[in-house]
Structure formats: C-alpha cells, structure tokens
Amino acid sequence: QVQLVESGGGLVQPGGSLRLSCAASPSGFYTMGWFRQAPGKEREFVARIDYTGTSPDYADSVKGRFTISRDNINDPMYLQMNSLKPEDTAVYYCNAGLTMMSYHPGPYWGQGTQVTVSS
C-alpha cells in the first residue's frame, strides 16, 4: 500500500502564495499530482507530473499561476501556488499512480489539505 503525506495548506489573502508538498511512501515510478474539491462542487483536476519530473500538465484555471515540480522519485512533489484567488479555495488532495491522468486519477490518495483564500 502506498501512503501519501501532504503538507502546506493554510489561509492566505488573495494574491498571496502557498506551497503544498506530497511525499509517497514507499517511493516508486508514479505519476503524481493534485485534485481539489470545493464545498458543493465536484472534484477537479489541478496538475500532474510524471516520475521523471518532466512533462507537467495543468488545468486551464491554474496555468501560469501554479507550478508543479519533482526532482526524482525519492523526493516530495511540490505545488507552488501563486496569485491565489478566492476560487482556489478547496481541499487539495495529492494523488498518485502508475497511470494518472486528468480524467482518471491514480489509486492512491492523500488525506487532503485545506487551502483557503480570503481577505
């Protein structure tokens, strides 16, 4: 069983920044990424990156503001979130799998971390 441990959520003002991290144990050749779910809304894809740390993929709503990164399979995966907007408020879930797509999550999930953007 793969365990995903997230950290980095919190409260930030509009225009601010946060960085989320997610570590997989045991590590492996997983594609990793993030989904989010706001109250009363369906879960949506945010970003993903393959095990080589290349070929990032983003939802249109976060392109140019969020950056996903990963150095190697043994290091955490990060989501740098800049220029945050109130509509980014959600619980963010780390996700991983040997195959993980924007429309098809992998089988492994983190516990979720709350991101709140509010003045």
Image (tube, rainbow, N blue to C red):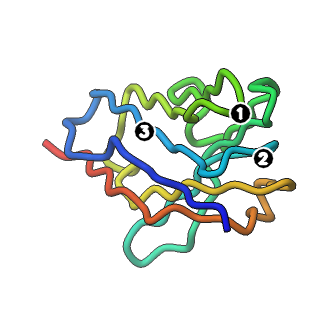
Reading the image, the residue beneath label 2 is: 30
User: How far separated are the C-alphas under marks 1 and 2?
Assistant: 8 Å
Q: Tell me which corner region of the image, top left, top right, bottom left or bottom right, holds residue 28.
A: top right
Residue type pointed to by label 1: Ile
User: How far separated are the C-alphas under marks 3 and 2?
Assistant: 18 Å
Reading the image, the residue beneath label 3 is: 20
Residue type pointed to by label 3: Leu
Q: Tell me which corner region of the image, top left, top right, bottom left or bottom right, holds residue 42.
A: bottom right
Mark 1 near mark 2, Cβ–Cβ under 8 Å?
A: yes
Q: Return the residue nearer the eye: 68 or 116.
A: 68
Q: Tell me which corner region of the image, top left, top right, bottom left or bottom right, holds residue 91.
A: bottom left
Residue 41 position, x and y percent, is 48, 73
- Of mark 1 and mark 3, the one earlier in the sequence is 3
SS label for mark 2: loop
Residue lying furthest front in this view?
Answer: 26
Reading the image, the residue beneath label 1 is: 73
Residue 12 versus residue 46 in the image, above or below? above
- Of mark 3 and mark 2, the one earlier in the sequence is 3
The quadrant of the picture occupied by the N terminus is bottom right
Query: How many numbered discs?
Result: 3
Residue 22 versus residue 55 in the image, above or below? below
Q: Is residue 71 left or right of residue 38?
A: right
Q: Nearer the viewer, mark 3 or mark 2?
A: 2
Disc 1 crowd, CA 10 A, few/some/many (<14, 14-19, 20+): many
Disc 2 crowd, CA 10 A, few/some/many (<14, 14-19, 20+): many
The quadrant of the picture occupied by the C terminus is top left
Disc 3 crowd, CA 10 A, few/some/many (<14, 14-19, 20+): many
Residue 112: numbered disc: none
Q: Return the residue nearer the eye: 109 or 64.
A: 109
User: How far separated are the C-alphas under marks 1 and 3?
Assistant: 17 Å
Residue lying furthest right in this view?
Answer: 99
